[in-house]
């Protein structure tokens, strides 16, 4: 379990996060200290690919129950599975404690509320059920991601 210090526009932030096993799905990302609302936590990085290439890759990823490509705009995506940061391990939740912010072709994960130390970071992937995968944010959730 490696602790990570997120970078914001070339400078280190105070945010410390850790990747470890998640009760939601596979790996998760957790706050190593309290995180204030609206704080930039980490940049979602990965290979920048065209919409057509993202569709091809997502078809392959979804067969494994994974979603890695993040929409930047109609033409471009970030594939977190190729050169991605720890942000790629932040799990989906219908009522997450984070949100994503796209600025130009950069994706940032920010806190949507005050997050206590030890809490798993989550955000709504906003996929509108396209992948047809069952949401695992809690045992009784019937939504699809």
Image (spheres, rainbow, N blue to C red):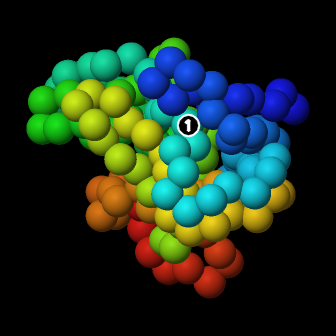
Q: Is mark 1 on a helix, strand or loop?
A: strand
Q: How many labels does the image show?
A: 1
User: Looking at the picture, does residue 53 appear above or below residue 43?
Assistant: above
In-front residue for pair 11/31: 11
Q: Residue at x 45, y 57 (%)?
A: 99
Quadrant where the C terminus is found in the figure: bottom left
Q: Which residue occupies the extreme right position in the image?
A: 1
User: Looking at the picture, does residue 78 appear above or below residue 38?
Assistant: above
Q: In the figure, residue 74 lies in which quadrant? A: top left
Q: Which residue is drawn at 30% across and 64% down?
A: 128
In-front residue for pair 136/7: 7
Report the residue marked by disc 1: 42
Label 1 neighbour load within 10 Å: few <14, some 14-19, many 20+: many
Q: Residue at x 62, y 83 (%)?
A: 140
Is residue 134 something that shows in the picture? Answer: no
In-front residue for pair 56/137: 137
Q: Where is residue 50 in the image (x, y as percent from the top left)?
A: 20, 22
Is residue 35 something that shows in the picture? Answer: yes
Q: Which residue is drawn at 36% across and 53% down?
A: 131
């Amino acid at each position: 379990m490696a602790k990570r210090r997120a970078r914001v526009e070339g400078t280190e932030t105070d945010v410390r996060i850790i990747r470890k096993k998640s009760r939601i799905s596979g790996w998760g990302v957790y706050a190593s200290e309290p995180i204030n609302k609206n704080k930039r936590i980490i940049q979602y990085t990965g290979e920048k690919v065209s919409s057509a290439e993202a569709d091809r890759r997502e078809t392959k990823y979804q067969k494994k129950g994974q979603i890695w490509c993040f929409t930047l705009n109609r033409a471009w995506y970030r594939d977190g599975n190729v050169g991605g940061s720890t942000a790629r391990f932040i799990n989906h939740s219908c009522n997450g404690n984070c949100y994503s912010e796209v600025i130009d072709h950069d994706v940032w994960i920010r806190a949507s509320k005050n997050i206590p130390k030890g809490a798993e970071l989550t955000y709504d992937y906003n996929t509108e059920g396209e992948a047809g995968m069952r949401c695992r944010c809690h045992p009784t959730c019937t939504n699809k991601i």
